[in-house]
Image: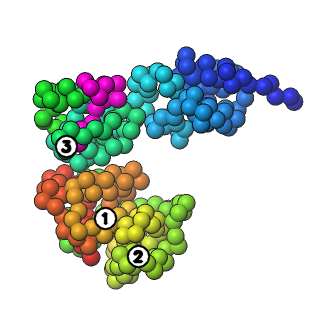
């Protein structure tokens, strides 16, 4: 069977008139080709700057859109996860947000919605402007004091995933969930084999061994920082956790919130290991908003 050739010009025109699109949208519009081929064509067009790729995804596929029409991206904001969509709505309404006036979960979310939140610094303070707001207009809003001064209240979904007790140790919860299989990922290393140069990874493994904790998966992010999937024994079975191990003199509320979001994305409770102290704001967040997060100092 001879495959009918697909015109790149036609693909580009569809992106401009109907975008943002994913490869499957193109296949349905063209009524020919397959998603792999169309995805490759879109990537080629993106490499030439003719289309842009969104960070918003659906089913693992990003959207492709016309760089001359960024406003079209508003049509796919509905595909953001619930927390990020809430932050998107807040930023769109307020137009400019000052970073340090908002709780850490919102600040993490602002960094996640890269298509819609653009950073800018004014008088040493970090602000985020809605992507369709010109920088000059954002500057004027900030100078006039129009940037919001009150953060949005924390959402129920931003509370602790599990109601574990705060303790100095990693005592397992009374009602453990079923263990989840941890998949090997690119860049991960064999469990129990930290890099010799990473003393903090060694300390984390020593802690796991002392507490009979099994390492299912480990990913070295950088020296002094690793992500683990671990399994804790309990009298009625094992429970699986996401564990962020980070060597840092002072842990911020943003560090804790980011770790908690990573665990929530994996549908796992979270343990945070560090060799430093918690900042005042981090301690307050742990007490009020992240009660399900277990923090242990090595």
* Image: 227 above or below 127: below
Q: Are marks 2 and 3 in contact (CB under 8 Å)?
A: no
Cα–Cα span, label 2 and label 3: 34 Å
The image position of residue 112, as x and y in percent, is: 36, 43
Q: 10 Å neighbourhood of mark 3: few (<14), some, or many (≥20)?
A: few
Q: 10 Å neighbourhood of mark 2: few (<14), some, or many (≥20)?
A: some
Q: Nearer the viewer, residue 156 or 75?
A: 75
Image mark for residue 125: 3
Q: Residue at x 31, y 64 (%)?
A: 271
Residue 102: image quadrant is top left
Q: Nearer the viewer, mark 2 or mark 1?
A: 2
Residue 121: image quadrant is top left
Q: Secondary structure at mark 2?
A: loop
Q: Secondary structure at mark 3?
A: strand
The image position of residue 165, as x and y in percent, is: 20, 64
Q: Nearer the viewer, residue 242 or 181?
A: 242
Image mark for residue 271: 1
Query: Residue 274 vs residue 262: left or right?
Result: left
Res. 89 in view: no
The image position of residue 274, as x and y in percent, is: 28, 69
Quarter occupied by the N terminus: top right
User: What span is in magenta?
Assistant: 125-137
Q: 10 Å neighbourhood of mark 1: few (<14), some, or many (≥20)?
A: many
Quarter occupied by the C terminus: bottom left
* Image: 242 above or below 94: below
* Image: 180 above or below 136: below
Q: Secondary structure at mark 1?
A: strand
**Lower sequence index among marks 2 and 3:** 3
């Amino acid at each position: 069977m001879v495959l009918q050739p697909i015109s790149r010009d036609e693909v580009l025109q569809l992106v401009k008139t109907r975008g943002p699109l994913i490869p499957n949208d193109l296949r349905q519009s063209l009524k020919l080709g397959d998603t792999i081929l169309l995805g490759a064509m879109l990537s080629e067009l993106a490499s030439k700057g003719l289309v842009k790729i969104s960070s918003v995804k659906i089913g693992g596929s990003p959207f492709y859109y016309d760089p001359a029409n960024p406003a079209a991206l508003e049509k796919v904001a509905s595909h953001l996860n619930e927390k990020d969509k809430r932050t998107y709505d807040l930023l769109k309404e307020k137009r400019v947000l000052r970073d340090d006036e908002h709780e850490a979960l919102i600040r993490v979310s602002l960094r996640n919605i890269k298509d819609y939140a653009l950073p800018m610094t004014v008088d040493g303070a970090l602000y985020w402007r809605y992507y369709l707001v010109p920088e000059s207009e954002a500057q004027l809003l900030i100078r006039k004091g129009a940037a919001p001064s009150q953060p949005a209240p924390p959402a129920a979904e931003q509370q602790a995933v599990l109601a574990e007790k705060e303790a100095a140790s990693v005592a397992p919860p009374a009602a453990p969930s079923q263990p989840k299989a941890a998949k090997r990922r690119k860049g991960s290393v064999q469990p129990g084999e930290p890099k010799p140069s990473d003393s903090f990874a060694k300390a984390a493994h020593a802690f796991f061994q002392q507490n009979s904790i099994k390492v299912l998966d480990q990913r070295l992010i950088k020296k002094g920082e690793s992500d683990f999937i671990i399994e804790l024994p309990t009298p009625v079975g094992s429970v699986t956790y996401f564990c962020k191990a980070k060597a840092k003199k002072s842990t911020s509320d943003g560090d804790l919130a980011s770790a908690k979001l990573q665990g929530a994305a994996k549908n796992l409770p979270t343990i945070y290991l560090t060799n430093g102290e918690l900042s005042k704001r981090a301690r307050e967040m742990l007490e009020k908003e992240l009660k399900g997060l277990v923090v242990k100092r090595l």
